[in-house]
Amino acid sequence: MIDENRFEAGALCATGVPAERVLEEVRELRSSDAPTHGGRLFAYVYDPAVPGLDELAAAAHQESAHVNGLDPTAFPSLLAMENALVGAAGRVLGAGPGTTAPDVVGSVTSGGTESLILAVKTARDAHPEIAAPRIVVPSSAHAAFAKAAHYLRVALDVVPVSPETLRPDPAAMAAAIRPETVLVACSAPSYAHGVVDPVTQIAAAAAEAEVRCHVDACFGGWTLPYLRRLGEPVPPFDFAVPGVTSISVDLHKYAYAPKGVSVLLHRDASLRAPQYFAYADWPGYTMINPVIASTRSGGPIAAAYATLRHLGDEGYLRLTAITRDAVAGLADAVRAVDGLRLMAEPESTVVCFTATDGGPDLFVLVDELTARGWHTQPQLSYDGLPTSVHLTVTAAVAPRVAEFGPDLTDAVAAAQAAGPVALPPELTALATSLTPDALTPELVAGLAAGLGMGGETDGAPLPERMAVVNTLLDAAPPALRERLLVEFVGLLQRPTW
Ligand SMILES: *Cc1c(COP(=O)(O)O)cnc(C)c1O
């Protein structure tokens, strides 16, 4: 006998639910998400606000959702679309016939993190003779490099960025290169602050040492070239720069494709060769994988292909112009408010600001902005860099810019009136004295409950106001931040029975 109640809460119900109701359930669940459209979410989503684009991408996704990228000979459609995407990315990034990088090749991956893991793996596997390989990255490099180093057992040499320029000193990057270094990396631009690293000098130092140089253009690879064409002073960062051996660019960011598509480019096929994994030593099919996944849905690839084809070069130029103007408007709004200052003059599509002395508590400000419908991203203080607020700006923000200034002024006034978060002294003591190893699951559960997190499974798992949580995290050193968040997220990720 099947007990119907046993199947109530999980995804598998005793008898199937009609299609219409299932869709209602999904919509109902989606209603508590941050808004992916409307230009008020400054992280996670990239929205061009082009009518009909979502429908086109969804239709293309549907056409190819069940096609498997595992074998390009069985599904030549995916091979063709991947080659087209790689060619487009190469074109945008200074490669292809008639350029100084005519032999560029690449792969389509599931995202920026996979592209970076593969860039590190490829560099590592190009040097099997190096027993303990290392990579050099600026401290502003995306966390995915640390993840790659961790997964691949490659040591990470981190060069601090200057608190003034938010860039690494190229001489310090050069000095960090050792005989075991297999890769030097930099960003165009960095995610946190949106500044472009001195790619020319870093790549020259890497070339001099005969080490590969990866430019992480996951964020800006699809906007910097268009900003340059619009007359903005974009420094060299692509394959036109001698010594750059690979570049990553996320199509699910500023190419405005739905999630699940990034491109990793190498200057030539011999540089790419160690990226492949091939295995014939089992009784099944010989496996030849250019990327981490083996079975891969064609859906995201087809959706990205349709998006690029539909928007076209002119479309991207237009969307970048709109975004540039939105960035300028938001930066002006920040400049106009007492108590805030830009971390850097915007040189890409990020607006990042911090508080001046006597300015508002930024974590309280972020909550005040959320209460006014603006979803910004707080960034914790780190290695001499202050707490900051990050805004990823996309074309959809443009029509909202005029509303942002007054709301920001209002939110700052409210945050000033509320004053900074005062943590109970015992929490501060805990955050500053606790070592990650001393954190027991019980201690974390107690902390989480105290902060209003993760307790009730049927209530809201997250507190409405995050300032207290952010203040606690900010007081803790990075290793403790990591442990605390792993435990918190672990508390959220429990099966529904
Ligand atoms: C987003 C981003 C990544 C990681 O990309 P995912 O698609 O989230 O895995 C890497 N580098 C930079 C600069 C990014 O902005």
Image (cartoon, helix red, strand yellow):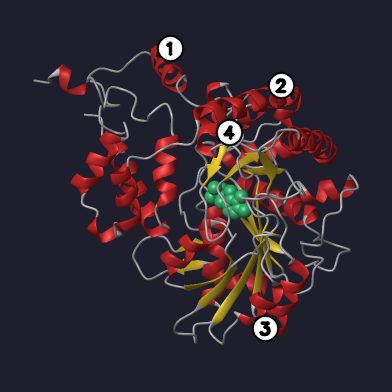
Q: Residue at x 49, y 47 (%)?
A: 296
Q: In front: 51, or 413? A: 413
Category of crowding for the residue at label 3, using alpha-carbon neighbours closer than 10 angstroms: few (below 14), some (14–19), many (at least 20): some
> Is disc 1's CB within 8 Å of ligand 1?
no
Q: Residue at x 62, y 32 (%)?
A: 60
Specify the label residue 403 is tagged with: 2
Distance (Cα) linking label 3 and label 1: 59 Å
Q: Position of residue 122 (x, y in %)?
A: 55, 70
Residue 12 shows which numbered tag? none
Q: CA distance from mark 2 to mark 4?
A: 35 Å
Give the spatial CA distance, label 4 vs label 1: 20 Å
In the picture as drawn, the residue positioned furthest to the right comes out as: 231
Location of residue 355 in the rendering, given as x and y in whole percent from the top left corner: 62, 42
Q: Secondary structure at mark 4?
A: helix
The residue beneath circle 4 is 61
Q: Residue at x 66, y 49 (%)?
A: 219
Reading the chain from its start, which is encountered first: label 4 or label 3?
4
Give the distance between the C-alpha atoms of the residues marked 2 and 1, in whole angstroms: 37 Å
Question: Residue flagged by tag 1: what amino acid is it?
Answer: Glu
Q: Is mark 2 within 8 Å of ligand 1?
A: no
> Label 2 to label 3, Cα distance in Å?
51 Å
Q: Is residue 278 above or below residue 296?
A: below
What's the residue type where badge 2 is placed?
Glu
Instruction: Indicate the quadrant containing the C terminus: top left, top right, bottom left or bottom right.
Output: top left
- Mark 3: secondary structure: loop
Tell whether label 1 touches label 3 (CB within 8 Å). no
> Dots 2 and 3: beta carbons under 8 Å?
no
